[in-house]
Image (tube, grey):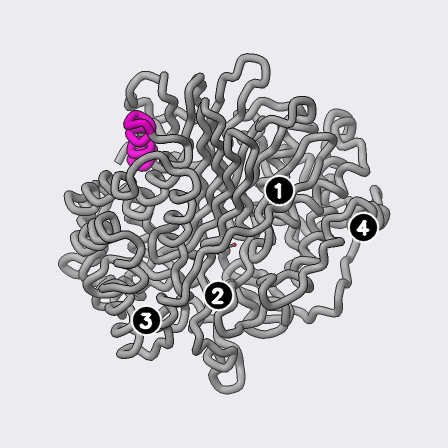
Amino acid sequence: MKRLLILLTLLAPPPAVSGQTEVVSGQQGMVATVHPLATQAARKAFANGGNAVDAALTAAITLGVVDGYNSGIGGGCFILIRTPSGKLYAIDGRETAPRQATVEMYYRDGKADTALSQVGALASGTPGAIAAYHLAWRKCGQLAWSEHFTEAAKIAREGFPISERYSRILAGKQEMFERFSGSRKVFIHNGKTLAADERLVQADLARTLDGIATHGPSYFYRGPVAKKISEWMANNGGVLNEQDFVNYRAKTRKPIVTSYRGHTVIGMPPPSSGGIHVAQILNMLEQFPVRDMYLEQPAQYIHHVAEAMKLAFADRAFYLGDPDFTRVPSGLISKPYAQQLANRIDSTASMSVESHGLPPHRIPLKPQRHTTHIAAADQQGYWVAMTATINTSFGSKVIVPGTGIVLNNEMDDFALAPGVANAFGLIGSDANKVESRKRPLSSMSPTIVLDKGSQQPLFTLGAAGGPKIITSVVLGISGVIDLELSPYDTLKKPRFHHQWSPDRLYLEQSHNPEIGVAMKALGHNVYSTSSAGVMQMIYQNPETGEFTGVVEPRNRDW
Ligand code: GLY
């Protein structure tokens, strides 16, 4: 399918087959998603009298149908909302380890085996997406609950032609889909996964969406969906059961609220690590004249930001976990702590961060794609940043027969054992070990930034890309605030990423080669990457009130 408009305003003309639109402006409202069908559904929500929350929920439910390798109702999400009166909601719809989950479940022959946390019955936590959507809707929605499902169910029932990218990802997973009858039925026809432009029809998923639309979340958590998933799990060596669904609750958390050069930065608290580490890295950057560095010696800008990223990720591996199970130090986001860390940054050499005694680790061969971010805002004053995921592409690779639901593989976001890296190369400590009913640590970083003068929303952003979410969001905020770039130029600018472990500085290939040379000279282990993070941003001009929405310019085929 050709890429249509993937970002629309109420005042924009109807979608045109431009194939290239990455930035749109308008006065009344804005929604930005990675997929044109999801954006169109969200636009209808606006047209039917919904607000930005309705638009974001509609987009999320539709993305689960048309972009189901990244997110869906078999997964989880974090939703950050600012209401017109300035009230904040940080809704935690993170998947939760089943009651019967244990660390030992993932051990074979004395070793933790990530194949078990990534594919099949043991990979899934209790999905939180529907509970989080419902909570957001109860707090702020203006449309009827069922309306958010109409487009998604229709597309699932009638099908839609899949993109080149979708078909490539499907083909790469064929062997794994073959193992599960529900996945085989949906994705494999005549011995092959669907090709580009073939229609993906998801009749079971359409029925499930209709059921949730009509009966509410109980259809999912206390009805046929929980029952079917539980039965499948029992027959396939899983432990997730009906009681886990009954027990599941989306939670409202206290958002992380910090400042960056006078602007207020609002982020997601644990079990996401996003809000804390975005704030921590920004706090370190506040200690340096990064704008001057960028203008005079761009390599110094990259060096200082990368060193700050490294220090933050070392803390992530040691301290971060589900706050209902572990004490996450509040001092991580304090300015004096940031100053101490910043003092360790040497402008002449990359440092080796021997932090917290964490052991060596395995480096993943190929970080995987996954997750999606939705940005929405409206003239009433609702702002929404929602990041949703089923973890790696197609999650556990399991579609539970009769439901059409792709189950997440979020159990892989736990640290299975010290030094055992997950699909993103991340390691962790006991703070993020597998425990019954615990939420695995996330990097998702939905963020809203308030203007330093008016303290009104200035922009919202978020990204996909595992740990690259955190670093992309930092670069997005620094791009607008430090480098004074337009939202579009901020997203377009070459990105870089460091996550402490592995000790690698990833530079996007679009960087000037001289940057790579300069970074090597500073002692960085430089690796090239084609793209770091998939970001959406909405910016509101404080003078004119005009919204500008930008979708990730790096991705052209959804
Ligand atoms: N599953 C990726 C994340 O939550 O960070």
Q: Earlier in the sequence, mark 3 or mark 2?
A: 3
Q: Earlier in the sequence, mark 4 or mark 2?
A: 4
On whether ligand 1 comes within 8 Å of the CB at mark 3, the answer is: no
Q: What percent of the width, then of the height, locates residue 221?
A: 32, 62
Q: What percent of the width, then of the height, locates residue 85?
A: 54, 30
Q: Earlier in the sequence, mark 1 or mark 2?
A: 2
The span picked out in magenta is 36-49
Tell me the mark number nearer the camera, choosing from 1 and 3: 3
Tell me the mark number nearer the camera, choosing from 1 and 4: 4
Tell me the mark number nearer the camera, choosing from 3 and 2: 3
Q: Are marks 4 and 3 in contact (CB under 8 Å)?
A: no
Between the residue at mark 4 and the residue at mark 2, the CA separation in whole angstroms equals 30 Å
Q: Earlier in the sequence, mark 1 or mark 3?
A: 3
On whether ligand 1 comes within 8 Å of the CB at mark 2, the answer is: yes
Residue 82 visible to an observer of this rendering: yes
Type of amino acid at the residue the image marks with label 1: Phe
420 to the left or right of 352: left
Type of amino acid at the residue the image marks with label 4: Tyr
Q: Helix, strand or loop at disc 4?
A: helix
Tell me the mark number nearer the camera, choosing from 4 and 3: 3
Q: Earlier in the sequence, mark 1 or mark 4?
A: 4
Q: Residue at x 16, y 52 (%)?
A: 203
Type of amino acid at the residue the image marks with label 3: Glu
Type of amino acid at the residue the image marks with label 2: Asp
Q: What percent of the width, then of the height, locates residue 255?
A: 60, 46
- Where does label 1 land, which residue? 496
Q: Helix, strand or loop at disc 1?
A: strand
- Where does label 3 land, which residue? 242
Q: Helix, strand or loop at disc 2?
A: helix
- Where does label 2 land, which residue? 412
Q: Residues within 10 Å of mark 1 (few under 14, many from 20)?
A: many
Q: Residues within 10 Å of mark 4 (few under 14, many from 20)?
A: some
